Amino acid sequence: MNQTEKKVKRKTKKALINEIKITLNSDSANESLARTCIAAFASQLDPCIDQLADLRCAVSEAVTNCIVHAYKEKKGKIYINARMYSDRTVSVRITDKGCGIPDVERAMQPLFTTGSTEERCGMGFSVMESFTDGVSVSSAVGKGTSVFMTKKFE
Amino acid sequence: MDGLSIEFENGQMTVFVNCEIDHHTASRAREEIDGEFFANMPHRLVIDLTNMRFMDSSGLGLIMGRYSRCLASGCEFALYGADERAKCILRMAGMDKILNLKG
């Protein structure tokens, strides 16, 4: 039997069908812009409104974290990379070069915040996790943080 | 502030939120609501989210902060018109059981 006649089982791999990269200033006015950009990108999948709103909310939380915590409301850049795959999954990576998180596990606990407790309620990561299919965070103190989230659109 | 309208009637202050509430807009909303609250000292504060187009956890912070002000002043508090996503965020913080949620 020659090679071409052999039946080869191939695992179906999802293909990357689109990608965008955005760099924003860490200005709170850009929180809305970030949401709008990612929503416009994911709209190419003709998603249901609720799922799109979920992703907008998760992106808003991540970008807000960069502004409030990573850069402590000072100047910095926020790097957003969104990818769309053939299985209708969208991944969004939001990266900063801010102060970094000393204890990621602790930071992700509900109601934990290093912000002014009167108005920062420490639910950002909880919201991200609740409204996406998964969130992973990598960080180094003094270097920055990268938040990676995925959402599969039905 | 654009997107926020505040009305007074019979000692009740109603804040109609007609915009998106995120970290950016929450700080301006907070200043305006607190300014009117302390200038007028209502006996009831109602926050109406019926026409709010978006909320993330900054909105939760805004609501919780206003609720705290009410508790400290002996003022009643009620939240109207929260949609399913807003209720979900409130539930995550356990605030759905504490706040007076209507409609």
Image (cartoon, coloured by chain):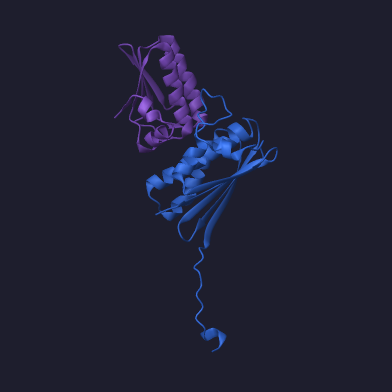
Q: Position of residue A150 (x, y in %)?
A: 50, 50
Residue most extreme to the bottom: A1
Residue most extreme to the right: A142
Is residue A121 positioned above or below A129 on the image? Answer: above
Q: Is residue A96 visible?
A: no
Q: Is residue A90 visible?
A: yes
> Between residues B4 and B46, which one lies in front from this camera angle?
B46
- The tint chain B carries is purple
Q: Quadrant of residue B8?
A: top left
Residue occupying image coordinates x 38% and y 45%: A50
Residue occupying image coordinates x 42% and y 27%: B3
Q: Position of residue A94 (x, y in %)?
A: 58, 44
Is residue A46 positioned above or below B75 on the image? Answer: below
Q: Position of residue A67 (x, y in %)?
A: 59, 34
Residue occupying image coordinates x 39% and y 38%: B85
The quadrant of the image that shows the C terminus of chain A is: bottom left
> Between residues A30 and A5, which one lies in front from this camera angle?
A5
Answer with left or right where residue B82 lies relative to residue A149.
left
- The tint chain A carries is blue
Is residue A29 positioned above or below A6 on the image? Answer: above
Q: Position of residue A56 (x, y in %)?
A: 47, 42
